[in-house]
């Protein structure tokens, strides 16, 4: 009987010793981690006393690893993935209980989308000797007069970066987007570019980036073979089916003189600079010539070129001025007031080496616009000296 009890005690002691030994067996990674955290020899416990914080940390890691093994065995959907955070106040509780309202962006049908419906492209050729039609967005079912704007000097210009000839950038005048949007309510808008195709392509990209609205865009062809002071707009008038240009067309162009000279000069002196040579004596850009065959007689609005003076006009103020002219004459531009009349030589006349002063007894009606708000220079900010030195 005693021998049996002795054998049982020895068997239990051998099981304890085997339990504390590091056994190598094929098991999962999580189970080996559990054994490493649990198994400690009596020598380690004697020479390396564990602090209560480390013991609690090991206990937490064992619980975490064992929890992962349980999730692998059972279905994950049975256990909650996230623990709900307690709500702090009453408003958050009501917000969590009430259903969330979905914010859906809808198209505003009340907004005036003027370029939604466009007329078909004209059957006339898109390229003539003078112009080429690049963009066509004429609005449908509208009966507006035509407003032609030469981009150079009116809407902006191309400035060269530093002194290099390769790099350049476009700079717009103030109020281009808002001004054209205002003109868009009562006019068809046509922009004419006097740049090369490469620069005009860059200009079109900038106009589309800023969402500037217009009905058509043309480029001037053969710029090096003809003079810049005059231009033929017959193709644009045919595309927009303008029958009476005297009553249905406004042209906005610039003069290559500064604003102070435009205020001082009168009559033909606005269009002629005797100190220059050749055809550079004419200060206009793309003004229609006086010719009986062309029959293009728009009302011309002259503004100072944006490069000639520091005080630049605002296109929004210019648009208000043009709409005021149209409303004053009740839409009949033939009855509009004008500052003078000018007649430039046409293509059928041979220009002498020394160009003559233009005539001012008949020809195109013109208006001079030089209104510019002077910018107030603010004094420099003066800071008080600190009390502590």
Image (tube, rainbow, N blue to C red):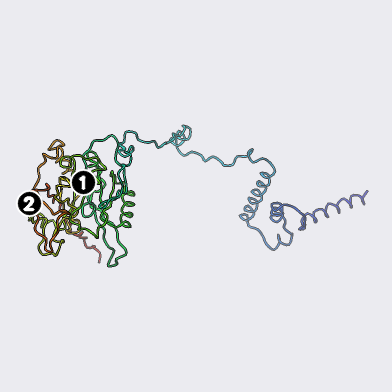
Residue at 66%, 44% in the rendered image: 71
**Label 2 near label 1: C-beta < 8 Å?**
no
Q: Position of residue 378 (x, y in %)?
A: 18, 56
Give left or right: position of 86 versus 43: left
Question: From this viewpoint, is residue 229 visible?
Answer: yes
* 353 or 156: nearer the viewer: 353
Q: Position of residue 104 (x, y in %)?
A: 42, 36
Give left or right: position of 146 versus 52: left
Instruction: Name the residue tied to disc 2.
Output: 360
Image: 107 above or below 382: above
Question: SS for tag 1?
Answer: helix
Question: From this viewpoint, is residue 375 visible?
Answer: no
Instruction: Name the residue tied to disc 1.
Output: 316
Q: Position of residue 32 (x, y in %)?
A: 71, 54
State the count of labels.
Answer: 2
Give left or right: position of 95 versus 189: right
Question: SS for tag 2?
Answer: strand
* 90 or 130: nearer the viewer: 130
Disc 1 residue crowd, few under 14, some 14–19, many 20+, Cα 10 Å: some
Give left or right: position of 291 versus 119: left
């Amino acid at each position: 009987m005693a021998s049996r009890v002795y054998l049982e005690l020895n068997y239990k002691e051998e099981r304890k010793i085997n339990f504390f030994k590091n056994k190598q067996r094929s098991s999962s990674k999580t189970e080996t981690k559990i054994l490493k955290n649990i198994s400690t020899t009596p020598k380690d416990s004697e020479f390396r006393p564990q602090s209560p914080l480390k013991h609690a940390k090991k206990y937490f890691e064992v619980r975490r690893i064992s929890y992962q093994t349980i999730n692998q065995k059972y279905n994950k959907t049975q256990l909650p993935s996230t623990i709900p955070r307690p709500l702090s106040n009453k408003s958050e509780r009501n917000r969590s209980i009430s259903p969330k309202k979905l914010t859906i962006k809808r198209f505003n049908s009340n907004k005036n989308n003027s370029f939604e419906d466009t007329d078909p492209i004209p059957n006339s050729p898109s390229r003539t000797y003078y112009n080429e039609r690049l963009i066509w967005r004429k609005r449908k079912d509208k009966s507006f007069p035509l407003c032609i704007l030469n981009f150079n000097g009116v809407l902006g210009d191309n400035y060269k970066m530093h002194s290099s000839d390769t790099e350049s950038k476009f700079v717009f005048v103030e109020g281009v987007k808002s001004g054209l949007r205002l003109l868009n309510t009562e006019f068809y808008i046509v922009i004419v570019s006097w740049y090369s195709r490469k620069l005009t392509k860059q200009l079109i990209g900038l106009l589309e980036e800023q969402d500037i609205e217009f009905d058509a865009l043309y480029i001037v062809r053969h710029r090096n073979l003809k003079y810049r002071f005059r231009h033929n707009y017959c193709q644009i008038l045919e595309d927009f089916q303008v029958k009476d240009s005297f009553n249905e067309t406004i042209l906005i162009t610039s003069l290559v003189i500064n604003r102070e000279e435009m205020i001082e000069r009168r009559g033909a002196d606005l269009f002629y600079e005797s100190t220059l040579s050749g055809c550079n004596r004419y200060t206009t850009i793309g003004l229609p010539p006086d010719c009986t065959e062309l029959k293009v007689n728009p009302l011309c609005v002259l503004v100072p070129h944006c490069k000639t003076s520091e005080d630049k006009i605002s296109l929004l103020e210019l648009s208000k001025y043009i709409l005021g002219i149209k409303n004053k004459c009740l839409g009949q531009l033939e009855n509009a007031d004008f500052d003078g009349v000018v007649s430039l030589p046409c293509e059928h006349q041979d220009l002498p080496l020394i160009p003559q002063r233009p005539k001012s007894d008949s020809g195109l009606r013109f208006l001079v616009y030089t209104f510019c708000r002077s910018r107030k220079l603010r004094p420099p900010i003066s800071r008080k000296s600190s009390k502590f030195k």
